[in-house]
Image: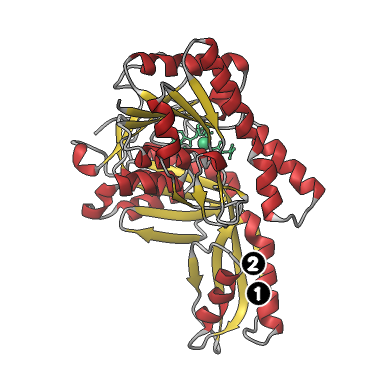
Amino acid sequence: MPVLVMKFGGTSVATLDRIKRAAKRVGVEVAKGYDVIVIVSAMSGETNKLVGFVGETSPMYDAREYDAVVSSGENVTAGLMALTLQEMDVPARSWQGWQVPVKTTDAHSNARIEEIPTDNITAKFGEGMRVAVVAGFQGVSDEGRITTLGRGGSDTTAVAFAAAFDAERCDIYTDVDGVYTTDPRVTDKARKLDKIAFEEMLELASLGAKVLQTRSVELAMRYKVRLRVLSSFEEQSDEAGTLVCAEEEIMESNVVAGVAFSREEAKMTLISVADRPGIAASIFGPLAEAGVNVDMIVQNISEEGRTDMTFSCPIDQVARAQKAMADAKEAGDINFHDLVADQEVAKVSIVGIGMRSHAGIAAKMFQTLRDEGVNIKVIATSEIKVSVLIDRKYMELAVQSLHDAFGLEKAA
Ligand code: ADP
Ligand code: ASP
Ligand code: MG
């Protein structure tokens, strides 16, 4: 029988009533003849609570135990979903990551899926089970320890299962009815897209649009999974939601497809470093080794052989970056006067594959921000995106004005 993957996020399984509603959706697909793999998140708020417990117990926690704790929210919803389906006379069974097993790297709290053997679940389907309910977000390392896939990781579990089982589609049920031109919480002018290209979704996700975890889009693109985002709160047809697909499948689209933003950025400036060959390597080498994900970089013009070097990184990596730089200074590898961290910044980005063939998009973005009196601190561009770092207090204003300036309210 054809396999369908259906993933329900935290708000979609937040109460027993919502689990029941989700289970009914699953029942509809089972009745159509699909064998269904349901991926569940923890009830909304649950993972945050568990992360909080870990931090309170042990500020410099052991990542293996972090995973043991934070993965547990999904175990509860997987069991409850299987029970709910059984109550509806749908043959269902729950699976934790290690039972499948979802084999991952041992990069605790941010592991990558390496392999999902299909034999266990396929055998059960063969015996009459119609729904495998799998706890999202978790897997097991070679050493047999529980791992987690990074926040939002259930999306990635879902796409990985769709690829492994060659599913007809991977449906991501969430609290919005699709992918919008920007987060609908920031402007009510945000418009739902019927389709979005993998490349665009990948950029939007990696630049902060939390509707899909970045890695899930990467996997969908690589394995050609038909990925759909839709609401678990509304009655759904086969055409509902947003299809994330190859760009060839999209006839018309705006030059700019969407605006993304991230509040979780920090701007770090090394004041007065020697401007000599190899200086970038001796700064960014140790940062990389310390696991700091540097994003944007600017080097100022130098004066008397010294310059300032600015970079951005996730706000929760500031302490790590400071330590790496202090250690490198102590070891005599670099010399600088000061390291200034600005934690009141946000990154706002415009994304669209149309930018490849249209000039002047970045200029228009800068003019729009100028007209609003928003100062740009750092700029980064690629073929299909332009990102700026600005004061966080102007983030909403910037998103709204860019959404207006590029006419995203209306379809192409
Ligand atoms: P789930 O718990 O179902 O995984 P998430 O909270 O992770 O849900 O993702 C859904 C949220 O993503 C939406 O409520 C919305 O606020 C946010 N979001 C950010 N950018 C976008 C976008 N471009 N389109 C739709 N939703 C977005
Ligand atoms: N429960 C996990 C989180 O909140 C995984 C997920 O929901 O995708 O990050
Ligand atoms: Mg999510």
Residue type at mark 1 is Met
Q: Is mark 1 on a helix, strand or loop?
A: helix
Residue at image position (48%, 88%) is 277
**Quadrant of the rendered image containing residue 118:** top left
Instruction: Report whether residue 400 is seen.
Output: no
- Location of the C terminus (image quadrant): top left
How packed mark 1 is, by other alpha carbons closer than 10 Å (few <14, some 14-19, many 20 or more), is many
Alpha carbon distance from label 1 to label 2: 6 Å
Q: Where 293 sits versus 147, above or below?
A: below
**Quadrant of the rendered image containing residue 235:** top left
- Location of the N terminus (image quadrant): top left
Residue at image position (50%, 39%) is 100
| Colouring mode (rainbow / by chain / secondary structure / one colour) | secondary structure
Residue at image position (38%, 47%) is 219
Say whether marks 1 and 2 touch (CB < 8 Å): yes
Instruction: Report whether residue 97 is seen.
Output: yes
Percent x, y of residue 176: 46, 26
How packed mark 2 is, by other alpha carbons closer than 10 Å (few <14, some 14-19, many 20 or more), is many
Of residues 130 and 119, the one nearer the viewer is: 119
Question: Horizontally, is 238 left or right of 113 in the view?
Answer: left
Location of mark 2 (residue): 321
Percent x, y of residue 363: 34, 55
Location of mark 1 (residue): 325
